Image (cartoon, rainbow, N blue to C red):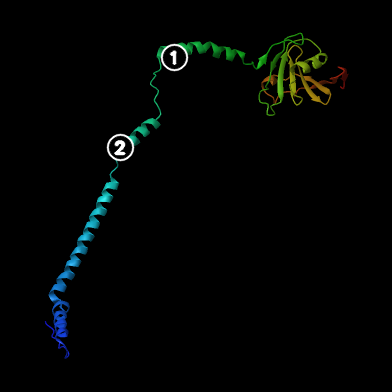
Amino acid sequence: MSVRLRAPPGSKSDINLLRKWQNNSLRVVPEGSYKKKKEGTKEMKQKLLIACLICMLGLSACSTKSDPEDQDTKTETQTENEPEEDSTESDPAADQASGQDSAPEESVEQSAQPEEESTENPLGFSVTFNSEYPNDVTGNWRLAMITEDIDIENYVLDYYNNYFTADKEVHIIINFARNTTTRINKFGNILYVTIMDYVDTEEHDAKLACTGNLLAEYHVDIESGEIEKIQ
């Protein structure tokens, strides 16, 4: 398509200038070439978009793969953190020897444990003492057994000083020589002494203890040692 311009009447130089302007400046781009240029721009954008997607996929693939040096470092760290196994194996002969050495120590410890029954004689005669009384529900009863033909009230204070460990205790003394049972309680500064007939097998059952007939009662002063007969 061409455009013709009519110059106004004037000089030839003005006409020449108009012609140059017509030939050089007012060139109209064909419609087909504009469409091709626009399509080329779209293709360039699509290529750039595909290139960006390929780069992103490559970066994600690289991030999923771990560096071999990092793996080696993690393996060494795990190896250092694992506890060392005891490589020393026990020697059966050494274990047997150590067991033999420890056996005497165990026997010494067992022999050092206090026995429940005692046959010491701090009173001048044999006393079989037991720190527990069978079937006692209070836990405070103690049992002593003797075979002496004596008046037990005369030995109560010495007995208290040697065998009582707490004021709440109740001591039962069975004298098989006289077939009597003596009960000793402490109240304040006084020892209450009750003497009864012996009941068969009462040393084996707290429910039977001290159920015999009453024979006598005494009060013994702990400080002065004075013995007072109550009944």
Q: Specify whether 101 is left or right of 119.
A: left
The residue beneath circle 1 is: 95
Task: Give left or right: position of 76 versus 214.
Answer: left
Q: Name which of mark 2 and mark 1 comes first in the sequence.
A: 2
Residue 10 at x, y percent in the picture = 17, 89
Q: Which residue is painted at 16% across and 73% down in the image?
A: 34
Circle 2 or circle 1, nearest the eye: 2
- Residue 124, which numbered label? none
Q: Amino acid at mark 2?
A: Glu
The 10 Å Cα crowd at callout 2, few under 14, some 14 to 19, many 20 or more, is: few
Give the vertical position of 113 relative to 46 (above or below): above
Q: Which part of the image, by quadrant, shows the C terminus?
A: top right
Q: Which residue is mark 2?
A: 69
Q: Number of marks in the image?
A: 2
What x and y, as percent, mark residue 42?
Answer: 20, 67
Q: Amino acid at mark 1?
A: Asp
Q: Nearer the viewer, residue 206 or 49?
A: 49
Q: How far across and how far down the image is residue 73, in percent?
A: 34, 35
Q: How far across and how far down the image is residue 96, in percent?
A: 44, 12
Label 1 Cα neighbours within 10 Å, binned few <14 / some 14-19 / many ≥20: few
- Residue 46: image quadrant is bottom left
Residue drawn at the location 22% of the way across and 64% of the way down: 45
> Looking at the picture, does residue 113 appear above or below residue 75?
above
Residue 4 image-quadrant placement? bottom left
